[in-house]
Amino acid sequence: MLTIHAPFAGWSSALAEIPDEVFARAMLGDGAAIDPTSHELCAPCDGEVISIAATFHAIALRSADGAEILIHVGIDTVALGGQGFMVLVRKGDRVRAGDALLRFDLDQLARKARSLITPVIVTNPERFRIVKANLDRRVAVGDVLFEIEAIGAETAVHDQRAREVRVSEAVVVEHAHGLHARPAALIARAAKTLDYDLEVRARGRSANPKSAVALMSLGVRGGDEIVIAGFDAAAASGVAEIARVVRALANLPAPGAGAPAPAERRPAPSAPPPPAAPGHLRGVIASRGYVQGPAARYEIDELSVSEAGAGAETESAALDGALAAVRASLEQRARTAPAALGEILDAHLELLVDPMLLETARTAIRAGKSAGFAWRAGIEAAIQRLNETGDARLMERAGDFYDLERQVLHRLNGSREQQGSIADGSILVARDLTPSQLIDMDAARLVGIALMAGGPTSHVAILAATLGIPMLVSLGDLHTIPDGARLILDAETGELNAIPTETEYGAAHARIAQGRERRARELEAAKQDCHLGSGERIELFANLTGNVADTRQAVEQGAEGCGLLRTEFLFLDRATAPDQAEQSRSYQQVADVLGARPLVIRTLDVGGDKPIDYLPMPPEENPALGLRGIRTSLFRPDLLDVQLRALLAVRPAVRILLPMITDVTEFELVRRRLDELRREAGVPMPQLGAMIETPAAAMLADQIARVADFLSIGTNDLAQYSLAMDRGHPALADRIDGVHPAVLRLIEATTRGAARHGRTVAVCGGLASDPQAVPLLLGLGVSELSVVPGVIPRLKALVHSLRLEQCRELAARALELSTAAEVRDLVSKGFTGRP
């Protein structure tokens, strides 16, 4: 028997008295509540501090016999961001019952929090139950609050021995934003293919890796270390597989990476913006742009559910049917969606079958609840777990859960999401918005979105950026804005003008018209071949992933071809490698859209940093320096042969690009094999190029250019290797700048070596999309840029405004500088970066 003491003075009551359904219905565990009258939180028992919320409002302890106790000070206090709290202990500290854990400002919490009532709960109810509680009475610090006992003590001991860790691996999560929805979904998908039960441990908590919700609830941030544990010696391969998936997360784009000019560096503001003028509301920029138009209010209908069910069998069948219908709808959308939207839909598909979410719902159904009530309970429990992390980015994922809640409830009710009437050129005004709501409405009619709530890295924000709709979030109260009111939404400075004067509205109209005319001119001009103002030909291509919709968009934006088709996406997230026929079909689809335009396809670029299930690799202490790119293909020549045969079958003939070449020997090995395969197929030898991604390749560019037909510089890796900074490292990623003079000198060495043999040099890395870097690259001798499709019209206009001699002079001066900051300052003073 373990006694849990009152952590502070106050009035004790049942959890049902808490004005929050997640706690009131004991979704996180059973316990008791206290309405505090003192300002110091003390340990309710002896134990170890296993978790402290990032916003300091909650602390969890683990007793010697394994009971996990969570004390959550007040309701919705996570929104205070740590204000009013002072933590007195650290995670891992051993404490005695009655030791002070944290202090809080009782008056401040009373003014700002929804409620002061504090749940004290046992969060592992599968092992412990409450046998006696002292409720509805005044308690002092140290008084008995409740007593708990282990459930089946002998069984618990046996289970504990069975759960002893036999194999484990520690790994650092290098994705800048930690385990948010997409990374968690990728881990869960991989874990579900394994035969062994595993556990992921971090920040004093543990989670089943098969549950994306559980993984997100750990609150893991970029740079945190996690431990993957297995309880059977045979689980070693499973532990290693999950560790590989976690390491590969460093290659995922961060949320919002699909924003309009992703490679453009925007300096952080040096000071907070000035206060807004009357009628001007400040928000957070989620998608950039400047628009005006009438307000279109979007009021979301409330979906009611009955609590009582019609029997477990009936309600389970209803829930299964609704889940299946929503899943089919999501899968259909994902098949034709652009890449950015497809990633969001993939994450929703994984959450829809999350074991933790489903188990909460099915438990409620077994307790007599309706399918709708049970599903909502599961969603609310999942959101509460995210809120408990105190991580703002994870808390923004609540929108994904609300989205799934509404979709399933509509299926259960036989209803559809309201569409609303949106006039052309409107600015949508709403409290919040989900991705599916934005997808289902006629978004083409919108020019902007203004939300009272939401966050800049939410999935609806990413979707708005993908659709090119300027969007502000976290604007506060917008209820006073009537439908049809004239608005100016400035998503460049983060301000909504809700009561513009005639003069302001007219000026905004003129500014937008000028911008629209400029963009129209750029888009029209982008249909023509790209030339410098001094006449020299510069080819402007697009980087693609094989998605047909993205390829069409690139052509519409003026892409003159594809300078980099990444093929690894065809190989990832599957149990076996794609065969020759599947690969040929995939490549041919892109070729058909491009027509006669050039198509450069890079061979498989995977390895330690991008693991695949069916390609077991030896463990590598530093994957970035191990079997990567062409090394992996030479390690598995059978996979290389299949891909080369598939590439030779594409018509018209494609250019083939080999990744991570470091010397002539690697290149010639593949060239000889390609020549043998093309003779077997009876086709001409295609052009074969080499990627320059390491200092070694740059310094040997003259030798490589002697045997290669063309060179293409991957500036992301070239900067990483030359500056000795891991581009996946959260503390260093912002310091890796491709315009560093050391990187520019390697680019210059590459173009100089290629010129000796009359070879062209392209840049397909992120630097090619950076307007400030473009004149430098052209001045260094680059004649082809392959960029993200959205910036093609702007870059074509920019290139046309430049003269080659001007670019050469600028580049020569940049090579003599010492830092990337000095180079950018030089470009800013000598060249604005705008056509």
Image (cartoon, helix red, strand yellow):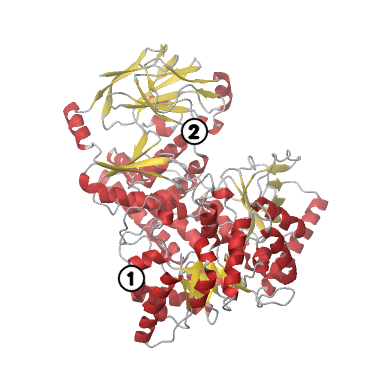
- Asked whether 788 or 630 is in front, the reply is 630
* Image quadrant where one finds the N terminus: top left
* Relative vertical location of residue 300 with respect to residue 604 in this rendering, above or below: above
Measured as percent of width and height from the top left, residue 756 is found at 59, 76
Mark 1 lies on a secondary structure that is helix
Front label number (1 vs 2):
1
The structure residue drawn at horizontal position 34% and vertical position 62%, both measured from the top left corner, is 574
Q: Which numbered dot is residue 637? A: 1
Q: Amino acid at mark 1?
A: Pro
Sequence order check: which comes first, mark 1 or mark 2? 2
* Residue that extends furthest to the right in the rendered view of this protein: 503
* Relative vertical location of residue 722 with respect to residue 397 in this rendering, above or below: below
- Asked whether 148 or 612 is in front, the reply is 612
Callout 1: few (<14), some (14-19), or many (20+) C-alpha neighbours within 10 Å?
some
The structure residue drawn at horizontal position 68% and vertical position 65%, both measured from the top left corner, is 775
* Relative vertical location of residue 137 with respect to residue 827 in this rendering, above or below: above
Measured as percent of width and height from the top left, residue 772 is found at 67, 59
The structure residue drawn at horizontal position 23% and vertical position 37%, both measured from the top left corner, is 163
Q: Amino acid at mark 2?
A: Ala
For this view, does 65 lie left or right of residue 80? left
The residue that disc 2 covers is 54
* Image quadrant where one finds the C terminus: bottom right
The structure residue drawn at horizontal position 60% and vertical position 70%, both measured from the top left corner, is 751
* Relative vertical location of residue 601 with respect to residue 243 in this rendering, above or below: below
Q: Which numbered dot is residue 717? A: none
Q: Name the quadrant containing residue 785.
A: bottom right
